[in-house]
Amino acid sequence: MLTATEITRYTADGYLPGRPLLTAHETAFYRAGCEAGCGPIKRDGTRRQSSNRVKPYLLFPWAAALVRHHRILDCVQSLIGPDLMVFHTTVWLKEPYSETFVPWHQDATYFGLAPFEHVTAWVALTDSTPENGCVQILPHSHTTGQRPHFDQPDPKAMLSRGQTLADAIDESRAVALQLAAGEVSFHHTLAFHRSGINRTGERRIGIGVSYIPTRVRHVGTTRLSATLVRGTDTYGNFDHEPTPLVDEDDAALGAHADSVGRFWKASESIPAMALAH
Ligand SMILES: O=C(O)CCC(=O)C(=O)O
């Protein structure tokens, strides 16, 4: 569990820097599963398509185990309570010398969730450094509420339409979340963050897992699904998702298509949510 000082720091700053939560053996296991299973993102025009880099915990037992990792859940529980669901997950994989980047954004823009309690656990499966495009975060930015974004389409942007915060950002205040493989950082759903290009000859791989307390609800009309990973759900705000038993078998593919399809549908009724994650 996190200490009272760490919780106070998260509340004040909107993030917690990396801490070692996975063993070397676990990190190697998850990385091997990820590299074997998660193929390239497919695009249809400007839209990111359902791919196994989105919600991989519905497709692969290794990813289902990762989002339930007890040390990650202990930290998340310290921040948002004991009844926890996984709402979303994205594999952020930058190839060697890849010029892909993530513009400044707030995760809340795309999820249509209320209240703003969602926490992203960013799990480093490789070292993540300023040289290979680690996440950068703007401390205290989560206190400004939901801010406007605009589209800046760019094939190198890892958000599908290049969604970018409209606010002027004092980049000199940004903090690089430098993580060793196996470390996990946490950021608030309203925290401004971005990441740069990979200037190294090695892959940079991180997995962003979006946790919500069961009391959080989706504000749109589409009934969405999520996975209960700790505690109980007395709210029923989401349909519960199944756990995959075998990599990408028919049951897993069906559950994944159903969940991601609902997410895409919801994003059409909330324009600001459109297909970024
Ligand atoms: O991994 C990255 O480069 C970006 C991560 C991100 O935007 C997120 O986890 O919300």
Image (cartoon, grey):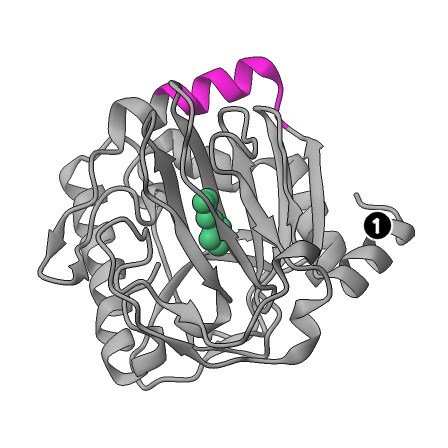
Please tell me whether residue 23 belongs to the stretch shown in magenta: yes
Q: Quadrant for the C terminus, please.
A: bottom left
Along the horizontal axis of the image, is 116 left or right of 98? Answer: right
* Image coords of residue 218 (percent x, y): 43, 78
- Can residue 111 be seen here? no
CB of residue at label 1: within 8 Å of ligand 1?
no
- The amino acid at mark 1 is Glu
Along the horizontal axis of the image, is 218 left or right of 19? Answer: left
In the image, is residue 251 above or below residue 202? below
Q: Nearer the viewer, residue 190 or 171?
A: 171
* Residue under pointer 1: 6
Please tell me whether residue 51 belongs to the stretch shown in magenta: no
Q: At numbered mark 1, what does the secondary structure look like: helix, strand or loop?
A: helix
Stretch in magenta: 22-32
Which SS does the magenta portion mostly show? helix
Residue 269 occupies quadrant: bottom left
Residue sitting farthest toward the left: 45
| Mark 1 crowd level (few <14, some 14–19, many ≥20, 10 Å Cα) | some
Residue 258 occupies quadrant: bottom left
Q: Residue at x 46, y 36 (%)?
A: 206
Residue sitting farthest toward the top: 25
Q: Nearer the viewer, residue 265 or 168?
A: 168
Residue 270 occupies quadrant: bottom left
Q: Residue at x 62, y 31 (%)?
A: 179
In the image, is residue 178 above or below residue 276? above
Question: How many numbered dots are placed on residues in this image?
Answer: 1
Q: Quadrant for the N terminus, please.
A: top right
